[in-house]
Image (cartoon, rainbow, N blue to C red):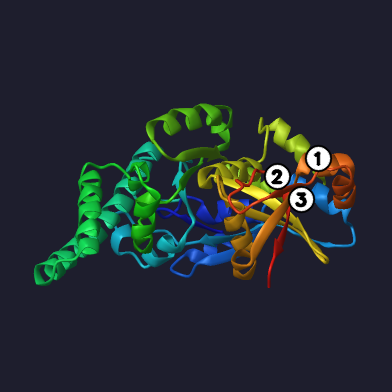
Amino acid sequence: MNFTLFGYPKTGKTTLFNILSGAQADPSAYDGRREAHEHISAVPDARLDRLAGLYPDRRKVAAAIDFIDLAGTNYGEVKTGTFLNALRKADVLIHIVRGFRDERIPHAKPSIDPAGDIRAMEDELLLSDLLSIEQRLEKLDKELKKAKSPEGEKEQNLLLRLKLQAEGGIPLRIFSWTEAEEKAVRAFAFLSQKPILHLLNFDESDIPRLAEIEKELGAAIPGTTVLAACGRIEREIQEIGDPAEKAAFLAEYGLLEPTPARFFRAAVGLMDLVFFYTIGKDEVRAWPIRRHSSALRAAGAIHTDIEKGFIRAEVVTGDELFRQGSWQAAKDKGALRLEGRDYTVQDGDVIFFRFAP
């Protein structure tokens, strides 16, 4: 999974990148540079930890997130910016928004305005999509004048509907997509269609108001998630080695839960993911998959050969497996179910796939 952090300059983006990913990137390294930082992190997963505890001789493999930290993008430059392709490759966009006040750190606008910056960025993403739609419609129009094509006409009709919505200022993630329509436009990688989390970076003095800020701005921005944090304080606390001391500082500042824990929960919800698990000869592994996915699709997430040769899925819920203590015990107690390719995978399922090589 690719989570890309982006935003306007001087928002504290790299500080939050370090907090979320566990990286040690130097925020000052971006002054005058355009390179991105990258760090791969494991998704925190208490169920996987517990499952691995049942099989201590096997390697634990968590789902991974590839965090990308892009340099700041100037106002109005997203549609033509250097990082446009990087944004299109993202599975989730993490927009870092400045809420802190610090005269030593210049801001491109006269005042700090998180709500205004969110609206400006949403407009830029939508404008980028509108340009892509108009370019494709222009090309399609020429093609259809030369030769009629039912598929071309169908694409044209869909793009015209998307163009109308984009011109109305409504992000494409709000569009009522059918599965076929989503597949038809996948190659465009529309930015306003992607899941987006607006992560606001506030001052220490704003900590008592963070929940209120999230509620207020979240209600104003449909189809997105808004989280508020204090990057400077959380980075300092994160560097404390002693867990008890770290917890004491969090409590002292009124931070009931660290931002990474809230972030991962929100990101999984944004992507509408569930997790299933496998127990192999050498490893226990977590697999993220879209909610409502079939057993056949889950098999394909592991390997296309398993999907092609799918015979059946042996399934036990994680709770039942923990209750019985092992796969074999669950099988002996009749807790395993045999499911076909159309079975809808549930969050927490532990699955063994039978397939013909």
Q: Residues within 10 Å of mark 1 (few under 14, many from 20)?
A: some
Q: Look at the picture and state if 293 lies above or below 205.
A: below
Label 2 sits on residue: 348
Q: CA distance from mark 3 to mark 2?
A: 9 Å
Quadrant in the picture for the C terminus: bottom right
Percent x, y for residue 95? 45, 49
Marks 1 and 3: CB-CB under 8 Å?
Answer: no
Depth order, front residue of 150/155:
150
In the rendering, which numbered label is found on residue 48? Answer: 3
- Secondary structure state at the residue bearing disc 3: helix
Q: Which numbered tag is attached to residue 320?
A: 1
Name the residue: 43% across, 65% down: 86
Indicate the position of residue 27 as horizontal and vertical percent values: 55, 60
Q: Is residue 4 left or right of residue 232?
A: left
CA separation, marks 2 and 1? 10 Å
Disc 3 vs disc 2: which is toward the camera?
Answer: 2
> In the rendered structure, which disc, 1 or 3, sits on the residue that comes first in sequence?
3
Q: Earlier in the sequence, mark 3 or mark 2?
A: 3
Between marks 1 and 3 in the image, the one whose residue lies nearer the viewer: 1
